[in-house]
Amino acid sequence: MLKRLCGFFAIVGLVTATPLADTAQAAAWDIESDNFQIRTFAGGPSAAQLRQQCESLRTGLQQVWLTAADQTEWSPRCQVVVHATKSSYQTAVGRGAAQTSGSSTVRVVAGEIVGRRIDLLCDARKVASALPHELTHVVLADRFDAARPPLWLDEGIATMADTTEKRTLHHRDCHDALRSGDALRVAQLLRLEQFTSAKQVPAFYGQSLLLVHFLAEQGEPAQLIDFAEAALERGYDRALRDIYQIEGIDDLERRWRKYAWSKGPRTPQSLVSVIAR
């Protein structure tokens, strides 16, 4: 779940959110690194291990999705806050996040990123499993600092960083939607900004994951970001021809559906080689 804030107004998000707190919080951070400020709770995940995990994961995500020029240190650093209880987590991110376990916020002012934050809710094993997904959102924001990434791209790439179990569920949801006829047309998927029914949600995440896989396999994974930027500037039909030699959205629809059916029950492997868990 990503929220992008412009000034004090949320302009991107799947939930209603409060602005990024200046709370940089009155108390000192448990531990800091070049790119992160970490706060956990007594008996929770080790702040030192979490710092190492964040830095390793950030490096792996950047190597897959960004160019060398984009792989710079973060200023401001990304605040990572781990919550022990759902009430603490919801107080931080808003009641609209009741069904989530992770939230990432990027604050943008005049086209510049001025704040990064990830809130995580630990599970029963005191594991913050949503970190790779949420950190992916923050990494991708470096290439879209003046605008938002298309929702399918942002969530599709972030979902790729999820656990194998979660990706398997999304893959199943995609195939269920294809079999039932509830799958979104690719033209809808590419332009979807808000869900209009609960039925759209599982289909959207599953289809976005497989669309990201399909396009990433047509060239280098980082070309996906070039494609999304080109689509924002020139439209999807021209961007598909320029980047992938695909003759527009209708051609993409045919190719992607053939690809999705060919995968059958197999869950595609994550393209992110460095996932520190």
Image (spheres, rainbow, N blue to C red):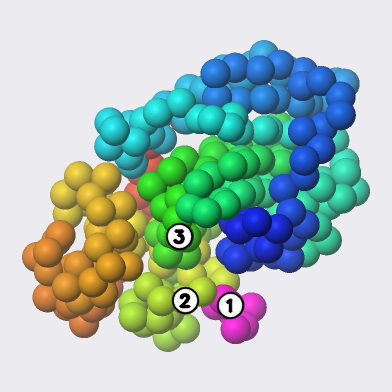
Residue type pointed to by label 3? Ala
Name the N-terminal-most of marks 2 and 3: 3
Q: Badge 3 is on which residue? A: 147
For marks 2 and 3, give the CA distance. 16 Å
Which of the two residues, 239 or 171, is positioned nearer the viewer here? 239
Residue 129 spot, x, y in % from top left: 64, 38
Label 3, secondary structure: give it.
loop
Q: Give the crowd class for mark 1: few <14, some 14-19, many >=20 residues within 10 Å.
A: few
Residue 200 spot, x, y in % from top left: 55, 77
Q: Which residues are magenta?
A: 194-200
Name the N-terminal-most of marks 1 and 3: 3
- 230 w.r.t. 69: above or below: below
Q: Badge 1 is on which residue? A: 195
Which of the two residues, 264 or 111, is positioned nearer the viewer here? 111
Which of the two residues, 19 or 276, is positioned nearer the viewer here? 19
- The answer to whether one can see residue 255 in this image is no
Q: Quadrant of residue 126?
A: top right
Label 1, secondary structure: give it.
loop
